[in-house]
Amino acid sequence: MDTAVKELEKRLLAEIKALYGKRLVSVVVFGSAGQGTQRCDSDLDVLVGADRLPRGRMKRVEEFSIVENRIEPFLKSLQQAGIATDLSPVIKSPEEAEKGSPLFLDMVEDARILVDRNGFFKAVLKRLRCRLEKLGARRIWMGNAWYWDLKPDYKPGECFEL
């Protein structure tokens, strides 16, 4: 399965580069694929950072569908081999990525950055990692998932920001 996932990532990256061209800022694999713990039914979580994106999630998904359509024959061949992988893209502008997202929490630990113009997303994650360390945040395994205790010494009524 590792070989198939690597090939999928390679093809996906080529199609993302073809679609976004010079607008492309970052491509980051996260989730179970970022951790290296994906199963044969895991999706491939990918963050795409790009300049001059269409406004609104649906328009971005529509634009990204070009990538999905080009990858679809390979995904079908994986399904025939018993690997039921789907793509789960998250598409953000650099300005949106700078603002942060709860989605980035686990990326601090598990992201695999495939493309990163001028170290942009690496710097976003570094700032978040530093903030988490200042708060004393801890990532805790419970049952079959991770969760974050963002501020273990939190006092009721206290406000804090990531």
Image (cartoon, helix red, strand yellow):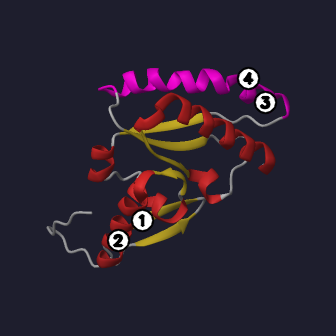
Residue sitting at the far front: 22
How many numbered discs sit on the rendered protein? 4
Q: Earlier in the sequence, mark 2 or mark 4?
A: 4
Q: Are marks 2 and 4 in contact (CB under 8 Å)?
A: no
Kind of residue indicated by mark 2 = Leu
Q: Is residue 124 above or below residue 33?
A: below
Q: Element under label 1?
A: strand
- The span from disc 1 to disc 4 (Cα, nearest Å) is 38 Å
- The span from disc 2 to disc 4 (Cα, nearest Å) is 41 Å
Judge the density around disc 3: few (<14), some (14-19), many (≥20) Cα neighbours within 10 Å. Answer: some
Q: Element under label 2?
A: helix
- Magenta part mainly helix, strand or loop? helix
Q: Earlier in the sequence, mark 1 or mark 3?
A: 3
Percent x, y of residue 57: 36, 28
Q: Nearer the viewer, residue 7 or 145?
A: 7
- Tell me which residue sits at (80%, 28%) in the image: 77
Question: In which quarter of the view is residue 22 placed?
Answer: top left
Q: Are marks 1 and 3 in contact (CB under 8 Å)?
A: no
Residue range highlighted in magenta: 54-81
Q: Earlier in the sequence, mark 1 or mark 4?
A: 4
In the image: residue 78, left or right of residue 26? right
- The span from disc 1 to disc 3 (Cα, nearest Å) is 34 Å
Instruction: Identify residue for label 3.
Output: 79
| Tag nearer the camera, 3 or 4 | 4
58 in magenta: yes
- Tell me which residue sits at (26%, 51%) in the image: 99
Number of the label disc, if any, that sits on residue 20:
none
Q: Earlier in the sequence, mark 2 or mark 1?
A: 2
Instruction: Identify residue for label 4.
Output: 73
Instruction: Identify residue for label 1.
Output: 148
Instruction: Identify residue for label 2.
Output: 132
